[in-house]
Structures are given as C-alpha cells and as structure tokens.
Image (cartoon, helix red, strand yellow):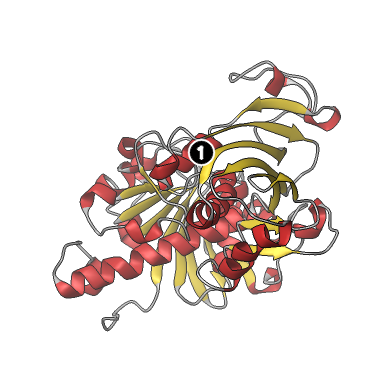
Amino acid sequence: MPALLNPSARVGINGFGRIGRAAFRASLDREDMEVVAINHTAPTLDYLLHVIRYDSTHGTSPHANELSIEDGALLFRGRRITLFSQRDPTLIDWSSVGAEYIVESTGKMTTVALGRQHIDSGKAKKVIISAPSKDAKTFVYGVNHTEYVSTEAQDVVSNASCTTNCLAPLALVLQDVYGIEWGMMTTVHASTSSQHILDGFSKKNRRLGRGISSNIIPTSTGAAKAVQLVLPELAGKFTGISIRVPVNNVSMVDLTVSLTKGAATKEDLLLPLRKAAEGRLANVLCVSDDELVSSDFLGYPQSCIIDSEATVMLNPTTAKIIAWYDNEWAYSVRILDLLVHMWRQDLLAAETGRGGDIRSAL
C-alpha cells in the first residue's frame, strides 16, 4: 500500500432515509472511512439528531450519547460533520469539506448522468449509487468488486439491490462448484418506506398501492436478472418475483436451482458454501444451522445467510436453498465495503501512475 496522506476515505452521504442513516450508523465503527458531510431534508437539526440516535427497527444507536448538534453541524467524538440541506444536488459543495466518495442514497439519482452531478458540480471524486442502475457499472462486493478500475468510466457505480447482494454470492459458489442450468427466485421481502400502511396509489402497479400492514403483496423484481450483471456466465438463466410481507426488516431469498453437476446429499450441497463462508466470502456469506426466524437475523452484516435447516433437495441436481438477509443493515455495510475498496484502488492507481485524479494522495 502507498503511504496515505488521508488515512481513511472521506465520505459524503446524499439522502438520509433508511439506507443513508444505516450507512452512517455503520460508518461510526469503522476506522477506514470518515463521513464528513450529510445532505438531508429533515425539518430541524434536532429532529435529524433524533432519527440518528433512535430507530424503531435497529434500536438506539450505541453511539447515541456521543452524537450532538453544535453550531449547525453534527459532532461525533469531537469530529465535525457538515450538514447540508439542499434539494438541488448541484448546489452541494462536497469539495468544501473534503468529501470525495459520495453515497448516493436518495433513490432518485440512479443514472450515471445524475450521479455525475456530485462530481461535476460538487467536485467529488466517486459516487456509489445505493440502488440498481440502468447504465452504471454494477458491483456486488465479494462477487465482482475486484473488477473496479480507477478510471473515469467508473466514476459512478451501482451497489445493485439488497436482494442481488444476497443472491449473487450464493449463485457464485453454486456456479463455480456445480454449474447452474437455471434458477427461479422468490424474494420474500420486508416492506419498504415506499409502501402504504393503508390502501393508496402506486405508480408502479396496483398491488403495491395496497396497504402493507394487512396484505401479502406479489410484485416484480429485477434482482434475479441483475445477477447476470455481476456474473455474465449466468445470462438468461435467472428470473424471479418478489413477495412483499408485513415485517419492517429482514428478507429471504427462496432459490430453486437446477445444477449441471449433482450433489449426493444436502450436506454435500452445503459444504462449498460453508467453505466459502470461512474463506473468500467471509463476512459476506454465512451458514446458519439453527432453527431461526426473520427477526433473529436483524443486524447481521452478511449479505447472504444460508438456512441449512430450510434448504431441501428434490434430487441431486434440483434444490431449493433458503437465504436470509437484513435488507437495510447488511446492504449498507456492503456499500461501505465497496466504497473503501474503491478508495484503496484509487490510491494505488495514483501511486503507480495508472490513472485516477486522487486529490487526497497528491
């Protein structure tokens, strides 16, 4: 590693909803990154501090008493975090506070052109979109993050969806060991903030307009097909649907898969997944052998938690694999993992002269 003038990535967060706040909470326990600015739309700073400290899903922050508001800024352990409140992203001057890597978590700026506004106007360096994107390079940490290159073409990237982050590591191991003929996925997904408590209207489809508190709601998802963006060898082999259910958090992938090479027993099927969890996919994938339910996985940082008890086989080449994921927390942790990986690669590129206008290393 080159000598670092900035010993950690300097981060800005644009959009402070469910993912923005979870990413900020997760950042407080990391030494390899520092959030230096947040762009929010809270009505008051006291209200902003309240939602940072307290959360109905994730509980009270362990750092609640270390966070305060002073002179219009958020303070954490004596460190000042600048607070912007701009509806127009072109008015955010990220460079004024040294924010180089932007977590774009509004859910609205999901294209390269929109993401680049943080670079062209705010003078940031890189943007990670916390949602699927139609044109940005898509990464799933642990699967294809090593394809990141410190070039202008990858100034704006996508962290895919929480469901793709669960499915892709599982598909990677199965493809490498057994080969995949096809996969059919159902994600039993927790409700999200875009859904209604009582019946209303949805721009996407009529079902999503119905009240989540009293319904199980089938809808579409691009998560299964998006696997081919990070595993091109699986192009055309995956599809799936989403079932929204009335829980606040933690979702489940139900994957029925046809394998090219069979596994003699369920434990044979699970063995390479266990090895991956202890090796190359440590902290991204794990296997649970306990008889647990969704709430037990709240706060797990892994993207994909294989449920060995719920996994079944029809025959050596046909299996149904169940995997859990905290669709807020684990996804937010992966955003930060990807961001730090990009920062490190950018520093290496600047050190070796292979590209990258890395201001913090100049």
Where is the N terminus found, in terms of image quarters?
Answer: bottom left
Q: Residues within 10 Å of mark 1 (few under 14, many from 20)?
A: some
Please tell me whether mark 1 sits on a helix, a strand or a loop: loop
Most extreme residue toward the left is 353
Residue 297, position as x, y percentages in the image: 75, 58
Can see residue 228? yes
Horizontal side of 66 relative to 123 (left or right) equals right
Q: Residue at x 52, y 44 (%)?
A: 180
Position above or below: 227 against 291:
above
In front of the other: 328 or 181: 181
Most extreme residue toward the bottom is 3
In front of the other: 48 or 349: 349
Can see residue 98? no
Residue 75, position as x, y percentages in the image: 55, 69
Which of the 4 image quarters holds residue 264?
bottom right
In front of the other: 40 or 275: 275
Which of the 4 image quarters holds residue 164?
top right
Q: Residue at x 78, y 64 (%)?
A: 289
Which of the 4 image quarters holds residue 52?
bottom right
Q: Residue at x 64, y 20 (%)?
A: 202
In front of the other: 315 or 59: 315
Residue 22, position as x, y percentages in the image: 61, 56
Position above or below: 184 against 303:
above
